[in-house]
Amino acid sequence: MAYVIAEPCIGTKSGDCVTVCPVDCIHPRDDEPDFATVEMLFIDPATCINCGACAAVCPVEAIYPEEDLSEEWQKYIQINADHYK
């Protein structure tokens, strides 16, 4: 199981989560070319170590363990994974 970034991140992209991630699994960073063209940040499920550091600092409470996502936000599991294909 990994953490997932959900709908509240859209339009926010604060980057606090990127800074605290010990395995660099949240992208795009603000210095990456696609940062300006995406609406939100994404967690790579293959790299995430399920530490929760990102969720603790998210100012809009957009990051959840996959198993705790509400029914309406289940689609963000695939949205995050698709970003890394």
Image (cartoon, grey):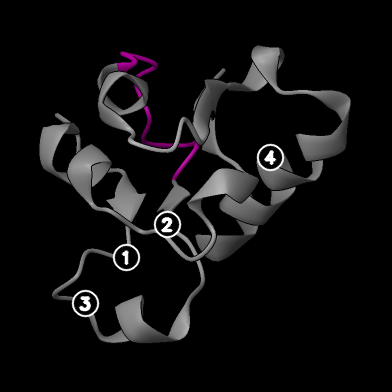
Name the amino acid type tagged 4.
Answer: Ile
Residue at horizontal 32 percent and vertical 77 percent from the top: 35
Residue at horizontal 87 percent and vertical 27 percent from the top: 71
Pointer 3 residue: 32
Residue 11 drawn in magenta: no
Residue at horizontal 38 percent and vertical 30 percent from the top: 48
Residue span colored magenta = 44-52
Left or right of 85: which side holds 74?
A: right
Q: Which is nearer the eye, 56 or 76?
A: 56
Whether the residues at callouts 4 and 2 have beta carbons within 8 Å, the answer is no
Pointer 1 residue: 28
> Residue 85 in the image: x percent, y percent?
57, 64
Distance, label 3 to label 4, CA atoms, is: 22 Å
Distance, label 4 to label 2, CA atoms, is: 13 Å
Q: Which is nearer the eye, 80 or 61?
A: 61
Q: Which one is in front in this view, the residue at disc 3 or the one at disc 2?
A: 2
Distance, label 1 to label 2, CA atoms, is: 6 Å
Q: Which is nearer the eye, 12 or 52?
A: 12
Badge number at residue 41: 2
Pointer 4 residue: 77
Residue 47 drawn in magenta: yes
Whether the residues at callouts 3 and 1 have beta carbons within 8 Å, the answer is yes
Name the amino acid type tagged 1.
Answer: Pro
Distance, label 3 to label 1, CA atoms, is: 6 Å
